[in-house]
C-alpha cells in the first residue's frame, strides 16, 4: 500500500478549502515545495483555468515529458487527522496542475519540510520526525 496522508489545501487565490488524500512520492523530486494536483481539484481551488501568474512548463516524468501549468505560492497545505484537526505545521506550496495524474502528489521537498518519515512503504506506515507513534496511510 503506498503511503498517503490527509491534507487540507487552502487556495491563496480565493480561499477555497479542500481536504484530500495525498500520495507521498519520493520520486517526485524538487528543490521547491511543489505539489501536483489534478485539473478537477485545481478547478475547485480556483486555479483552473490557470491564473495570470501561471507558466507552462515541460516536466520530465517517468512516462516521458509532459506539459503542465506551474502556479507559484498557490496553496497553504497542512496535514490533518481523520477529524480534520491539524497535525503538522502549515506550509505554502507551488501547484503543478496535472492533466494526467488522478491524485495529489507531494514532492520529496514537501515531505521533508513537513517532517514526515516513511517507516513501511508496503504496509503504509509513517510518522512525523521525532515521534514514536506510527500512523497508517490515509
Image (tube, grey):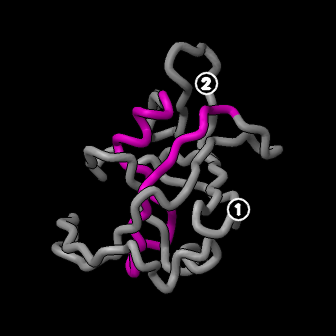
Q: Kindly identify the residue that appears in the image at 66 percent across and 52 percent down.
A: 8
Query: Quadrant of the rendered structure where residue 85 is?
Result: top right
Query: Where does label 1 land, which residue?
Result: 17
Point out the stretch of residues depicted in magenta: 87-115
Q: Kindly identify the residue that appears in the image at 37 percent across and 49 percent down.
A: 107
C-beta proximity under 8 Å, tags 2 and 1: no
Residue 112 lies within the magenta run: yes
- Classify residue 82 as left or right of residue 42: right
Which of the two residues, 48 or 122, is positioned nearer the viewer here?
48
The x and y percentages for residue 137 are 59, 43
The x and y percentages for residue 108 are 34, 42
Query: Where does label 2 land, which residue?
Result: 134
Query: Quadrant of the rendered structure where residue 133 is?
Result: top right
- Classify residue 28 as left or right of residue 61: right
The x and y percentages for residue 62 are 21, 64
Furthest-front residue in view?
A: 52
Furthest-bottom residue in view?
A: 49
Q: Label 1, secondary structure: give it.
A: strand
- Classify residue 75 as left or right of residue 121: right
Q: Label 2, secondary structure: give it.
A: loop
Image mark for residue 107 = none
Q: Determine crowd level at label 1: few under 14, some 14-19, many 20+ residues with C-alpha closer than 10 A.
A: some
Amino acid at each position: 500500500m503506498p503511503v498517503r496522508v490527509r491534507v487540507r489545501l487552502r487556495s491563496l487565490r480565493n480561499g477555497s478549502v479542500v481536504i484530500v488524500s495525498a500520495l507521498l512520492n519520493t520520486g517526485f523530486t524538487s528543490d521547491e515545495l511543489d505539489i501536483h494536483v489534478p485539473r478537477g481539484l485545481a478547478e475547485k481551488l480556483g486555479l483552473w483555468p490557470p491564473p495570470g501568474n501561471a507558466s507552462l512548463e515541460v516536466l520530465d516524468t517517468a512516462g516521458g515529458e509532459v506539459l503542465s501549468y506551474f502556479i507559484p505560492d498557490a496553496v497553504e497545505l497542512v496535514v490533518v487527522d481523520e477529524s480534520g484537526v491539524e497535525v503538522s505545521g502549515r506550509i505554502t506550496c507551488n501547484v503543478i496542475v496535472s492533466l494526467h495524474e488522478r491524485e495529489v502528489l507531494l514532492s520529496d521537498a514537501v515531505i521533508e519540510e513537513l517532517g514526515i518519515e516513511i517507516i513501511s512503504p508496503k504496509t503504509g506506515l509513517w510518522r512525523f520526525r521525532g515521534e514514536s507513534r506510527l500512523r497508517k496511510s490515509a
